Image: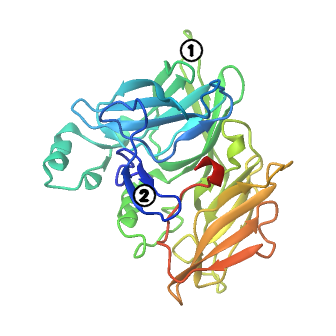
Amino acid sequence: LSKPPLTGGPPIELDPESLETIGEYRMENLPKGAFFSAHPKEDHFTTDKGQGKTIFNNGLVIGPPMTLRLLRATEKEGVTNSRTLPMSALSFVHDFALTERYGVIFLNPYTVSYQDLLQGLVGTKALGMLYKWRPEDKTRIVVFDKETLEVIRDFRAPAMTFDHVINGYDLDEDRIRVQLLLHPSDSILDIEKGRHDMYQSTWTQTTLPTFHNIDITLGSSGSPPRVDTYEVSPLLSELPQINPRYTGARARWGYVNALKPLSDGALPGKLNAIGKIDLETGEFTVRGFGDHKYADEPIFVPKANAQAEDDGYLLTYVYDTTTHKSEIHILRADNIMAESEAVISLSHHVPYSFHGCFVKTDEV
């Protein structure tokens, strides 16, 4: 688990059987003071022989000076390489993209200045309340080489804001595509206000993100980098997932927590459904669970010996407002409109917007 409000700090280790908190998990060779962001990426293209999985992540280092630390780690050795990026202000960095060759970090202009940071450090104000939207600073995009963590490009693009990346992949030798859920940039203050209390907040077309492609042309010594941004699907959604085996490759299907109108046509004000998006065409299917039920993030679980990309299951919590309890629904990923494969009724509720990932028993 990662720690709020900045998805910063060392990961928290839980007992996989009892879910009791063991304490802070210190990865081997993790530099002192390094935070560990909420969305590490497993690299399916790199093989560190005998060392197990290779993982990339980043973490804020709250100064002064303020920096962002890039991390490469293996299952057995822990952190094998790290590199720091200087920051002029503390950026909110929640997620990033990984391709076959590169990592891509977006430092959006939702930041804490050095002056304001002092209030958080002395405790006069919560650090998460000190962020301000500064579009004039633009979005800083950093592209780094996965093998060495060397920065390949570091440049500014028009201001944007998002929380979650769907995927990323190389288009060709000079171009990268990052797929993400982009928020309307003129509603950032309403978005942050809503996050302070997910139960009391209302989410609408002006605050919810939609699926965009961010195409990055790296350029060369003679031409600067270029960014082309365009919407692929208008579906209002968050908390995206793909088949994790396709991280960094060109995936066809994305799965999201989506907004579905109620039976009377009104919008529910909160994400309440599961969506499946064709990442090539933008076409989508949305499956709801009833007017009083609210689904959460869909977790993709591949079938054993799966052949197709969507040959697997989606697991999601569904919160029932009439009983104040939750259910676990297991859906077919290849046909989310089919009847649930299984429904597990819980004796309690799971906090709305709780989300994570799937891990096999033998990997715990």
Contact, mark 2 vs mark 1 (Cβ under 8 Å): no
At horizontal 71% and vertical 41% (from top left) the residue drawn is: 246
At horizontal 83% and vertical 50% (from top left) the residue drawn is: 306
In this rendering, position of residue 55 left or right of residue 134: right
Q: Amino acid at mark 2?
A: Ser
Vertical relation: 238 (above or below) 327: above
- Secondary element under disc 1, as helix, strand or loop, is loop
Q: Position of residue 129 (x, y in %)?
A: 27, 56
Q: Position of residue 311 (x, y in %)?
A: 81, 55
Asked where in the image residue 101 lies, by quadrant, the reply is: top right
Which mark, residue 223?
A: 1
Vertical relation: 63 (above or below) 307: above
| Marks 2 and 1, how far apart at CA | 33 Å
Q: Amino acid at mark 1?
A: Ser
Q: Position of residue 58 (x, y in %)?
A: 44, 36
In this rendering, position of residue 26 left or right of residue 103: left
Q: Position of residue 153 (x, y in %)?
A: 50, 21
- Secondary element under disc 2, as helix, strand or loop, is helix
In this rendering, position of residue 340 left or right of residue 50: right
Which mark, residue 187?
A: 2
How crowded is the residue under tag 1: few (<14 C-alpha within 10 Å), some, or many (20+)? few
**Residue farthest to the right?**
307
Vertical relation: 209 (above or below) 252: below
Disc with the residue nearer the chain's start (2 vs 1): 2
How was this image coloured? Answer: rainbow
From where the camera sits, is residue 239 visible?
Answer: yes
From where the camera sits, is residue 360 visible?
Answer: no
Asked where in the image residue 218 lies, by quadrant, the reply is: top right
Asked where in the image residue 285 lies, by quadrant, the reply is: bottom right
How crowded is the residue under tag 2: few (<14 C-alpha within 10 Å), some, or many (20+)? some
